[in-house]
Amino acid sequence: MIARHPKKWISGAFILGLLVIVGCSDSGTDATRDATFIADPNAPVQASGSELSIEVSGDLRHSSDEAFELVVSLAGSLAAGATLSLEDSPNFLTLTTEDQKISADYAVAGVHTVTVTAKSGNKFTTSSFDLTIDATLHGRYEGLTDLDGAAYTALITRSRLIFWSAVTNGATQMSIHCQGRFTTNITEASGGGYCKRTADDAPAVLSTGFDLTLDGDAINLVIRYSDTAGGLVSTDSIGAMTRLDRSYLDSDADLTGVYVSTQLGSVRWLSIDSDGVVQDTSADGFEKFRCRIDAFISPFDFSKVRVSYDGAIQGISGAWSDCDLTDQAGLRVLVGDASGQNDGAVRFYDVGPDRYVDAYLARDYPVYPDPVSRMNYARVCNQGLPTPIASQYNVDDNVCNDL
């Protein structure tokens, strides 16, 4: 029996194993060299600009309650057979592939990135753009100041006019009445204007700057009041002013007729015709001498609106004359001297069977020493007949026939 040396046996086994490994490795390398990679002929490929391109036309900024359309155009050698789709875009948008339009009946306030994709076979291209939606601010609001509980009401128009009034806690008459203009940036707005307040039993004019933010269905308003020399007088913060009007008169509602002042018996009546012309009028036995009017109502185009909360708020512009009511203690701030060229808003609303209109009037200060007024009227005649409220003002069939 021959004895094996352990070290020599291990060394031989190692050499044999190494030969086996090397042989296997050489065989695997040959197999890999024989394999061929085959590309997927249907894999997406970016189209060149000459093959396929996208262009989107239309206004890229809108109010959230306005319907709008954008037109998509395709160009290039593959355009005729290309299909369109919206990728990672807001869900309020609808793409109609037949006429290549992107549309919305409403939108959500914010800046939204919209991506349009066009495909033809395995070739594709994309185009992205930003769509800016401004919050719908117009309407009527009410709220209390954070500090002392003063009651504020505000009216905002689509033309970015704002009117607001305040009654201090415990007071029975308005303490301040204001008008201003603003610019909008999505859910925020800022601007300035002028106010009236009672000081030493006489109206005094203040200048104002304000910031406004929309929070859900409420607005937060911060107002800085200054004297006309620019010195800061006070600041009011009104948080969570809630929107008041939840419905509006139809765009074809009959607003025509004769309206009488609910503020002062000596104010001349106003007549509104079907073309929106507003003029003062009077009947035999009802001669009035204050506030002659020559104005025009400019209605908003409701065909663009699918959602609205503003009541029948429309624009008005024109001239008021002989309309100084500062001798009336209760009207010095609310009306004051409304004489001059006015640019503002009218709000029509119904209480039961009766129709009313409030005229919010803004004037250019210091061209006119009184910058803002509000005048209130009730309709007493419509289509030659007295309205239900007419008897409260001694208006009957004969008076309406004369008018």
Image (tube, grey):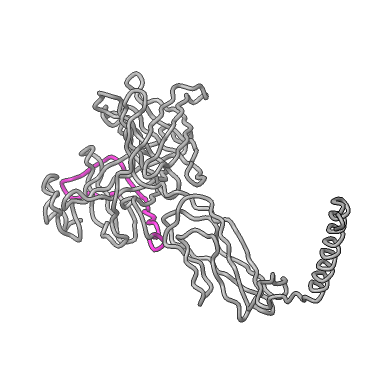
Q: Which of 80/149 is in front?
A: 80
Residue 335 shown in magenta: no
Residue at figure coordinates x 33%, y 51% from the top left: 309
**Which stretch did the figure color magenta?**
280-305
**58, above or below 271, in the image:** below
On screen, residue 84 versus residue 141, left or right, reads: right
Q: How many marks?
A: 0
* Nearer to the camera, 347 or 7: 7
In the image, residue 24 sits, relative to residue 310, either above or below, namely below
Image coordinates for residue 163, horizontal then vertical, percent: 38, 39
Residue 344 at what x, y percent from top left?
Answer: 40, 45
Q: In this view, does 175 lie to the left or right of 162?
A: left
Q: Quadrant of residue 263?
A: top left
Q: Which of 399 and 221 is in front in this view?
A: 221
Q: In this view, does 175 lie above or below 351?
A: above
Residue 27 lies, in percent from the top left, at 82, 71
- Residue farthest toward the top in the current orientation of the protein: 200
Question: Is residue 99 toward the left or the right of residue 274 in the image?
Answer: right
Residue pictured at 40% horizontal, 25% vertical: 204
Location of the N terminus (image quadrant): bottom right
Judged left or right of residue 348, residue 351 is left
